[in-house]
Image (spheres, coloured by chain):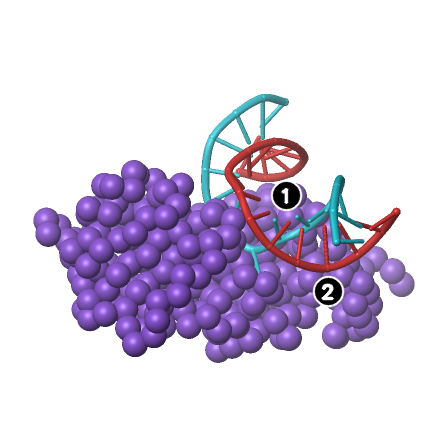
Chain colours: A purple, B red, C cyan
Amino acid sequence: MPELPEVETIVRQLASVLPGRLISSVDVRREDLLREDAASFASTVAGSRIRSVGRRGKNLVIGLATDTKPMVLLVNLGMTGRMLVQPASEAVAHPSHLGLAFYLSPPGVLFYADARRFGRLVLLSSGEWQQESRRLGIEPLEPGLSPNRLHRLLSASRAPIRSWLLDQTKLAGIGNIYAAEALFRARIHPAREARSLSRGEAAALLTAIRSVLRGAIRSRGTTLRDYRTTTGGEGGFKPSLKVYGREGEPCPRCKARIRRLVLANRSAFFCPSCQREAPRSDT
DNA sequence: AGTGTATCCTGCAGGC
DNA sequence: TGCCTGCAGGATACAC
């Protein structure tokens, strides 16, 4: 669910309300969302002050100043994770599938809720976070990513381009929805070998990735079912999806029926006419 | 270096 | 109505 645009939306909302506030206490309801035990997590976080809220790939990066040292609270939302903020003035109603509650001062509550509990909240030292961050690939919206650089990265891999796009160690932040949408816009078949893309195709793919991510951010993300903003609102990008989840529907460009194939055990939606696996060999 | 499979979970849609 | 199966935005570990 939450890919780069959804996480970016959440980060922007949190960044406008959290920095400077104190986390007075933490209520851990689902310990399996943590890597450490609930008691040590709570004792580290309680009493800390929120310094910053950022994003790296699909991860929320929350900077905390604790009693002893600066820490990073890394939140990966998995498929169904939600970050919900309750203003102090409202009665505190718990969301369904509540995982953790962070009680704030000035008053307010930050909830982490997660139906499937694939999400994770991890406390790291600054050094540990730097190491973790190095494992992730480049940010697709980072200006330093040029068409040539993308082409170089692609040329090292025989993986299908859709699998390559989902690999967070290559680019960080793209998931199944936006991979499908970017490949459609760039007219590239999802099963093409990454290294088979020409320089021109790599450039077109980069343009497509950026335009679809930026468009989705403008719409506050894509809500299929579970994704919510921090205020509980839905993202508005779903009507802009051209192929994802549209198997059997006509391609908006050429009217051919959109197809679904399975790559690495995950659905890949594409237009068989606009996105050819091999160059046309007819006439 | 790849893939396929399984795993972690719950919820929902569709078939019967 | 209910039971069953399949599928879902993600990440990771395993065998091959």
Mark 2, other Cα within 10 Å: few <14 / some 14–19 / many ≥20: some
Image location of residue A32, percent across then percent down = 40, 41
Measured Cα–Cα span from mark 1 to mark 2? 19 Å
Q: Secondary structure at mark 2?
A: loop
Could you say which is closer to the camera, residue C3 or residue A5?
C3
Q: Which residue is mark 2?
A: A246
Image location of residue A128, percent across then percent down = 25, 44
Residue at 42% x, 72% y is A231
Image location of residue A264, percent across then percent down = 63, 43
Res A62 label: none
Q: Is residue A133 left or right of residue B11?
A: left
Q: Which residue is mark 1?
A: A264
Residue at 36% x, 42% y is A31
Q: Is residue A253 left or right of residue A204?
A: right
**Total label count?**
2
Q: Chain of mark 2?
A: A
Q: Is residue A162 left or right of residue A104?
A: right
Q: Chain of mark 1?
A: A
Most distant residue in the left direction: A68
Could you say which is closer to the camera, residue A238 or residue A80?
A80
Q: Secondary structure at mark 1?
A: loop
